[in-house]
Structures are given as structure tokens and as C-alpha cells.
Amino acid sequence: MTRRFVITFGCPDRVGIVAGISTFLAGLGAQIVEAAYHADPDTGWFFTRQEIDAATVPGDVAQLRERFGAVAAGLSEERDWRIVDTAERRRVVILVSKEGHCLYDILGRVASGELDVDVPAVVGNHPDLAAITQAHGIPFHHVPFPPDGKAAAFDRLRGLVDEADPHAIVLARFMQIVPAELCTAWAGRALNIHHSFLPSFIGAKPYHQAHRRGVKLIGATCHYVTAELDAGPIIEQDVIRVGHADSITDMVRRGRDIEKGVLARGLRWHLENRVLVHGNKTVVF
Amino acid sequence: MTRRFVITFGCPDRVGIVAGISTFLAGLGAQIVEAAYHADPDTGWFFTRQEIDAATVPGDVAQLRERFGAVAAGLSEERDWRIVDTAERRRVVILVSKEGHCLYDILGRVASGELDVDVPAVVGNHPDLAAITQAHGIPFHHVPFPPDGKAAAFDRLRGLVDEADPHAIVLARFMQIVPAELCTAWAGRALNIHHSFLPSFIGAKPYHQAHRRGVKLIGATCHYVTAELDAGPIIEQDVIRVGHADSITDMVRRGRDIEKGVLARGLRWHLENRVLVHGNKTVVF
Amino acid sequence: MTRRFVITFGCPDRVGIVAGISTFLAGLGAQIVEAAYHADPDTGWFFTRQEIDAATVPGDVAQLRERFGAVAAGLSEERDWRIVDTAERRRVVILVSKEGHCLYDILGRVASGELDVDVPAVVGNHPDLAAITQAHGIPFHHVPFPPDGKAAAFDRLRGLVDEADPHAIVLARFMQIVPAELCTAWAGRALNIHHSFLPSFIGAKPYHQAHRRGVKLIGATCHYVTAELDAGPIIEQDVIRVGHADSITDMVRRGRDIEKGVLARGLRWHLENRVLVHGNKTVVF
Amino acid sequence: MTRRFVITFGCPDRVGIVAGISTFLAGLGAQIVEAAYHADPDTGWFFTRQEIDAATVPGDVAQLRERFGAVAAGLSEERDWRIVDTAERRRVVILVSKEGHCLYDILGRVASGELDVDVPAVVGNHPDLAAITQAHGIPFHHVPFPPDGKAAAFDRLRGLVDEADPHAIVLARFMQIVPAELCTAWAGRALNIHHSFLPSFIGAKPYHQAHRRGVKLIGATCHYVTAELDAGPIIEQDVIRVGHADSITDMVRRGRDIEKGVLARGLRWHLENRVLVHGNKTVVF
């Protein structure tokens, strides 16, 4: 893929915003490769994402940010924007426990080049997934979370994450409840995969809950981590059909494929700056 | 479709039950057209459904019931069974309010012969759907449910239903909470369509709840009516993908197609005696 | 829904087109309610659809067309555009044969107000669906298509369609192959529902073909009618899972629900001017 | 999972077969864990699969085979059956080319214990996937297929496969057309994943074909390999929705997830003896 500058912008909706942005870009000679717009009638908020061929824009991303910043300031007092240069490689830190299916899946995508990112660290509260991580040439950090030492463990985890300065922190079936303070520090960067179709079956053992209720579909949800458990902005969800013949073991096994797919899509969209958060909801362009 | 006898049978699982039933049927010369079995490891309960070509069985359904009853008694002290003759036409009573999409859908299926049933009555707590019902040659009964006269209204409704003696009572977006007493009287015959993927968004205005939570899929659930609201045994569920561009109005509109499909399948399976209830869960053969 | 002007525009892609259009609209004070853009890298063609709150634009649709025409001419020599006023009611003519499920479905949507259109005529080559059509207060025309009188029948059909001057001509399981001449006359307005996942199983009896091949999914395709059978631009497709237990009769029955849904979505998108045709492909905004 | 004996049996349908089999099993005291039946009205063939708790059956699998063989002979002159002991580990040989996504997926499932099989060999006609294979402790054999040396290469491949004596030979995007002779030798054991929804887009570059046709769904098909290209009995298929914004590159990338899932399910069902082939179709229990 050729190098691109990705602009995401949000502000209270009014006449003339698209004109302002597109006139600015046309003035630069910028070739728009992909563009999306959404005006939310409930919140009155306007969202846009523009992907621009970097080769058509004079100067580097810092200059584009400066120029666009001036335009943006003229468009709206209240605004939220970002410009990302796809030439800057994305870094992803992955947090795991014992269950490896999401980790295997992400590492496979990275190894095959489908997901073109660096993974500077995998952190596990159990050592089980060290070998496969290292086989991919990625450092594995074992950080145990004993009941009486969780605060210290989270401190160490935070240090490891800070060191990597990642664009995404993926809770790939991490199984530890992240403290509110860390949720704040990682806001908008930490993605969790929950193994149910939220808001059904919040919390522990969702497949057991689903089996007990006798639902005919089970699902998974990728969402941003917030202080309230399993209640953050939803990025992606999916389901599969189950029946009376599916035991809890079958649900756990079959659900893994949905978890992997939902997490992979959510992570890709996040890394491509396709996910704009507003309140507790997402716009996914 | 040729005439069939449909046997459904459940009992605590043990060795020899299939042999007992199939030896009995083979002894009669009964041609099994379709057969399904399920042994539930959690409850230890065994379920089977056998569809038999009626022409291959000597005698009528009453005789078959008598003979099978003796065999069943020998198989298990605790047991639950039924034999249905497909030559006996099924009767369906439909309860509606103002929203017509489920009613239109069912009437279209009946009119085209896809759903080969009699509809002796449609009852509405509003008169809006009288004309389309009558255009299909079906009596429409308007039973208003004023806040201070609900008990009397339910009495009248119960009378209308009793008169029709239906195999299925379909709450096709009926919008009234059925009293516990009536739930008991209609147990196993009353099907509701709820416009969410239960157990998410129980109760009123589920699309509004879904929109507020920012889910990426919306759904519908067909379940048997029980005294606890939206908590009865689930027969069928389905979902469709929604996005940030879908307003509540869009969700309501798009959800209708899921509601129609889920209700139609649930109703068909119920009428074909494919749904076996055990505890608060269903086996759907 | 409030009154809207819907602009669809396509031209060879180059820098400045979005700026040109959006600056024009901002200059008018037009509130954009919904906007979509697509630049196709294969054909080098740019597409956009803009939905505008009519109340924010001075003048009527004719004036907007005149003004926009001047702008469009300045943007590109080669161009394709249209502006539709949602205040002008859409007219839909439906062509049927004996199978009624698609007709029932569309009439139900019209009657319930979900599909806010006029249906000035239903034409059937068999009289079977006259009663249900007339029950909805819609004129039904029986035009037989005898083997030796097809040309005359198509002439009569053409006359009936011309008289209604419809925005959409829906072949709702019409079962007659439309002559090339009529395909040309109806280009971009005639929608067919084919009961397979095209390009699999072109032509007659697709469910029989699917059953013979042993596929695990069956589908339906809504496409614009062109002179080459079942080869026109595809608007929408969907599938459902089938298994070894599904007979051809089951496939026919279960497939109907997919046909209805696919046709309803395709028709809605067409009537909302969401479908832009370029070559033999569609952009669906 | 506890040890099981899995019986699959097929013969021309007639009254008394289920009774014969189930009476035999009841006589042994065999606990049936899972049972499925299908009578095909088109071919008149009867199929069954019975999963039995091995601990409830006296003797080993050889004795069960001998006893069941006698019963089966009494049931039908024409018959096709097999009894598998789940205590015997399954062996899977995987054939690959350059594209690794299916290999990564299978190896991840094996490593995590989800797919409880041995993989004695991976064979690649390119060396690209040697490292990941070896990282899982599995021998990788590079067998080049030069245009003028294909016959010798297939001989070598055959030798490698014969040595492993596998229950399944998985063509995980192998990209070489298997000669008829080998198709015969591997009949019923060789599974291919084709990256389209067959019978659409047979042969090379199906995503390119799909993109050109403008379909709105793309898919994948897992089928048994037969001498006729992409025409063998279909085991499993699935699709995902695509739109005008999906380039061929997007389709290739997004299609991979469908390929992986379809292949994984097809392989699991094959290894669990859930797939019964009859003519060119499968019954999947």
C-alpha cells in the first residue's frame, strides 16, 4: 500500500465543514483515496475520516498537521482531530493468560504480513504462551498476578507497556480486571475481546451463562476498555448459531473462532484509525 | 406432503430406549421418514422425535397412541410424550396491536399455502389491523385494553382463544403483558416475538436500548410465554448487522425483517412438533 | 422523514471534485444529512451521493438542478448525475407469475407504510395473484404469455408499464425472459430477483441445480435486468445455510425468505437512489 | 473427551434398520452418546452415525467390528460402514504453497489442543513456510514442482504421504492440480479449500473473477478432491459480505478468514467421521 496520511476529525455539525476540509485538501493538491462522513442526529456531532495519498501532499506529516490545525480551528471551537502517517509503523502489545487462540491468530496474521505491525512485547500472567511467542521472535514477559500482589503486578505491567509505547494494547483473553487508573492511562488504546454478545452475559464464564439461558446464538465483542467492566465502547461484534447439541465445551471451542475474527477486525480498524469514539459509542469508518 | 404421525418422546436416558422404540416401530412396519435423537449430558434427559409415514402403520392415530403408550410405560416411569397426526389441521390464533409486519407476514404465508394452517381469529387491542385481516377472510376481534380494564379484557381474550382451541397462540407484537394465570393456561402453546437478542434488552423499547448501548448487531427472539417477562424457553433467534449510520428508526425498520423471519421459523417448528421443552430450554429437532 | 434532495454524481476521479461540490452546497447553505464517496481504483471513476435537507436550500429542485448542472459541467466533461426530490412519490410496477411470496412481501411493506410508494399496477402472466392485489386496492392486469403470442403480450405489458411511468419495474418471480428491446427501454429501472447466488445456477430451476450439486448454502440475487440472462449488475445478494436434510421442496420454501429480503432491500436502495451503476457493477451507498 | 467408538453405516433404506442396529447396541449394553439418521428420498439411501461410550461396550474395536459386521450383513446386501476408535490418534498431512494463513490456523489449533491430531509432515512446493512449521516441531518437506518435472514431484509427494499413512491430506492452498491417479489413491481422504463459493468461480484467481462480476458476497468451499477440478463432494461452505469499496486485495485478505474457518470445520468433521459421501454429495452429521 502506498503511504497515506489519515485525517480523522469530529466537531458539532454545521453547514460548511466538508467544504472547508475538502477545499483545504484540494488547495494542497491532495488526492483523497478514501473518504467517509457521518452526521449523528442524536448528538449533533459530525465525523469524518479522509485517507490521502501522501505523495500528492507537499511537506511531511508535521507540516500537514500544522496547516490542518489552523483550518480546523477555523471550522469549530470544539473539535477533536488527528492525522496519522501510515509510514510510521504501528506497535501492538498483547496481554494474555492461558488461552492461546487469540494470540496464535494475531501472531499468524503478523507473520504472514497480513497485519503489518510490530509486536514489541507479549505479557502473560501465566507462562504457558511463552514458547509460541518466542518462536515468532517476540519477547515474552511473565508477570504473575497473585491475589495479594495484584497492584504490584499491574505496576510492572504498566512499566512494560509504557516502555513499548504502543498504539494498541490488546487484552487477548487476559482474564484480569484492569484497575480504573490504568483504564484511564490506556484510554482509547486498550482493546478487549469479551466472549459474549454484549450486553448479554457480562463478567465471568459467559458461555456457561449462555448455555444455561438456552440461547440459539453465541457471540463475541471487541470493545475499548473502560473502568466499568465490559461496558466500554463497542467496536465489533459477531455471532454464530448454536443448538441443543452444543455442550458448554462445544460453545467454548466454537466461540473461539468468533472471538478471533472479531478481535482481528477490531484491532485492524483501530490501527487504521477507522474507529472514532464519541461518548460511549463508536463510529467505524 | 403425505400424512404422517409425529412421535415426540422424552425420558431419563438409559441404554435400550432407542432399541425399544425402533423395535416397536419396525414391528408395526412403520416407515420412519425423519428421526432425531438427543441425550443431554447436563440433565441426563433423552429426547427423540420420529416422523412416520402414516400409510405404513396399521390403524389410526388413536390406536397408535394406545400401543405406543404401553411401550413407553415399559421404557421409563418418568416420561413425556405425544403423537400428532398431520391430517389434523393446525389452528393458530394471532394477537396483535398496531404494528402489522408480523401479521402481514404470517397471513402471506398462510395465503400462499406455505403455512398450511387455519387462522380462526386475530385479536387486536387496537382496530388498526382489522381490514387486512378481513381481506384474508379471517375474523378480527377488537379487544381494547384500557388501563383500568385490563383484567376484563384478558378475560374476553381468553374466551376468544378458548373458543378457537388453537395449537398456537402467537403474540405478534401484542404489546400487553400476559398475566401469570393466562401464561399457565397457555403453557407450551403461546409464542412471543421479542424484538431483541435476549437476554439483552428485556422489556420495553429494546431498539432504543440497543441504540443507546451502541451494539453492532440487533436481533429478535421467539420464545414460549411464561410468567417471567421475556424469560421463557427460547425457540429461535437471529441478528443483523447495524452500524453508526443506523438511527433508531432504521433499527426498527430493519429489525422487522428479523422479527418476521424468527417468528415464522419458530411458529413452523412449533406446529411441526419440532420443539421439545425441558426446564427452561428447548430442543429443536 | 423530512423532504430531501438527493444528488448522485459520477465522473473520472481527480483532485478537487469533492471540494467543488461541497463548496457549492455550503454556498447555498445546504445541510448535508448523509454523504458517501467512492473512488474506484480500477476504473478511475469517482462516485458520490449527497442527501440534503430540502428546507435549507433556496428554491425548488428544478433550480437546484440548474445550478448544480453548471457546477458539474465545470468539474468534468464526462459526467453522470441526477437530483431527486423525495417529495415526488415513487411509482413501482410489479410483474408476477404464480408464485406470490415476493408480491405479498412488497404489498405488506407498502400497506404498513414501511415502503412509502405508489403501486399503480401489478401485471401477471397468470391470474392467480389478482385477488390479493385487489384486496390492497391495486389494479391487477392479467396478460397471458402464450408460446405463439409472446411478442404481442410483451407489447401489451410495455404499454401498461409506460402508462404508469414507474421509477421501478419489479420482476417479482415473473418467469418470462424479457426481450432485449424492452431491457433497453427499461434500463436502470427493471429489477429482477433470481433465486440463486449468481453467478451460480443461472437460468431455470436454480434450487434443483443447487440440490444436485450438494451446496451447503443457497441464495438469491437482486440485479438490474439486461439483455444477457441473469448477468446484469448485481444490487444485493444473500444466502442461508442448507444441509443434507433439506429436500428441493425445503430449499424452495426456505429460499423464499431470502428472495423476499434481498428483493426488498434492493428495491428500497434503488428507490432511494443509493445504487449507482457503472459498467456491469453497482456502487451501493 | 472419553473414548468412543464411532459407527457410520449406509444402505438402501427399508423398515427395520434402526431397530436392527439399536437392538444390537442395546444388547451389548452400549451407551449411545450421539446419534443421527438420514433417509434420502432421492437416492433411497439410509445413513446413520452412532457415537458410543467405549467403556460401556465389552471387548475392543476389532471385536465390535466383527460383531457389527455380522449384524450389518443381515440388514442389507448393499452396505457401506466403518467403525472408528477415537483412542487411535488421527494423522494429518498438510500440503502448502506460499500462502500461509490456512497452515498457521491449523497449526495454532493443533498447538492449543483444540485439534487433537498428529501432523507427521507438511509438504510445500515452495520453501516459504518451512520455518513456522519447524517452530511447531513438525518436519517440513520442500518438493518443488517445476513445469517439466511435475510427475516426479507428485511421485515424491505420494511417497511422503504414503509414509505418513494419514487420515486426512489437507490441500491448504496447495495451488497444484492433483493428477487423477492420486485423486483415486487419496479418495475420501484429500480435502481441498477453494477460495470461492462453488460452483461460482471454478479454477484460478476466484477473487479476481468475483471482483469482476461485482458479487456482494464472497466465499470459500471445503470439498473432497476428485479428478474433476473443484467439482468434488462439498463438505462445508461459508460467505462474507463485500461491497464496492472492497478491492481485490481486500477480498483476498478478508476471504482468508472464511477459508480458514471453512477448512477447519471441514477437517474437524472429516476427522470425527461426521462426513458420509454418497455419489457426489455429502451427509454431514
Image (cartoon, coloured by chain):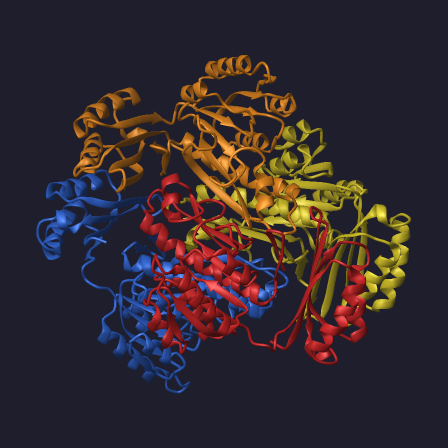
Chain colours: A yellow, B blue, C red, D orange
Q: Is residue D216 left or right of residue B195?
A: right
Where residue C120 sits: x, y (%)? 46, 75
Q: Which residue corresponds to the image point at 54% horizontal and 12% vertical from the top-left?
A: D152
Q: Nearer the viewer, residue A8 or A172?
A: A8
**C51 relative to A223, above or below:** below
The answer to whether any part of residue B60 appears in the image is: yes
State the quadrant of the C terminus of chain A.
bottom right
Q: Quadrant of residue A165?
A: top right
Q: Note whether D263 is above or below B62 in the view shown.
A: above
Residue A79: in sight, yes or no? no
> Does C265 sit left or right of D2 as displayed?
right
Identify the residue at image location x=69%, y=38%: A123
Q: Position of residue D143 (x, y in %)?
A: 59, 16
Q: Quadrant of the N terminus of chain A?
A: top right
Circle count: 0
D227 w.r.t. B129: above or below: above
- Relative depth, front residue between B121 and D200: D200
- How far across and how far down the image is residue D114, in percent? 50, 34
Tell whether D10 sits left or right of C119.
Answer: left
Question: In the depicted view, which residue is nearer to us: A180 or A236?
Answer: A236
Q: Is residue A66 left or right of residue D238?
A: right
Residue A100: x %, y % from top left: 59, 36
